[in-house]
Image (cartoon, rainbow, N blue to C red):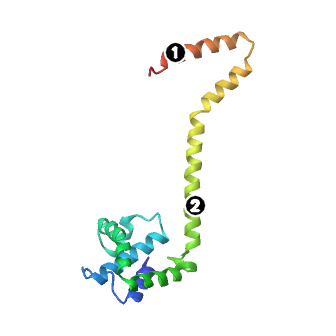
Amino acid sequence: MLKLIELVSKETGLDISLKTRKREVVEARALYCFIIKELKPKITFQKIADTLNLNHALIIHLLKMYPIYEDNNDALRENRISITKYFKDKNVDGVSVNEIKLQDKIDFLNEEIKKLTINNHKFEIINNLNKLMKDTLGTEKHELIQLRLDAFYQMNKIKL
């Protein structure tokens, strides 16, 4: 992220880490926030804020305002395009943009696998009971299990 701060400062000719409310600096900060969020979508607002020693609420505000700033400032749009091109195939903190996007996809798929595994554990008892019912079909044990499961169901069913 330090590389991006330096690049935004170089492209805009402004020090975005300065504590100032000058329009040009605020817009350049918004540009930085927009690009970092584009490159690393899962980064938190607080992490972005920490890189500039700002409050996370200001980062949220800058991200909301950026499209307006860009609509009214052609130079800002040109800076965004040139910086984005620079990072297209380059590294952000030693990790390529393609690797970041791939890692995001891997994280998403791992979360989906975790959800499926949790759901599978929830129904493991049902699968075991079904197997037991099939294995004991036609025996006295089957009838006893059936009676107990019916009783258990009747005791615990929710009245809607």
Q: Which residue is situated farthest in the top direction here?
A: 140
Q: Quadrant of the N terminus?
A: bottom left
The residue identified by callout 2 is 105
Residue 5 higher or lower than 104, as above or below: below
The residue nearer to you, when weighing 159 against 4, is: 159
Q: Which label was assigned to residue 154?
A: 1
Query: Where in the figure is residue 3, as x and y percent of width and height?
Result: 45, 81
**SS state under label 1:** helix
**Who's the residue at 61% across and 11% down the image?**
147
3D distance between C-alphas at marks 2 and 1? 45 Å
What percent of the width, then of the height, locates residue 92? 51, 76
If you read the primary sequence from the N terminus, does the residue marked by circle 2 or circle 1 appear first? 2
- Looking at the image, which residue is at 65% across and 29% down? 127
Crowdedness near tag 1: few (<14), some (14–19) or many (≥20) residues, C-alpha within 10 Å: few
Callout 1 amino acid: Gln
| Occupied quadrant, residue 43 | bottom left
Counting from the top left corner in percent of width and height, residue 37 is at 44, 69
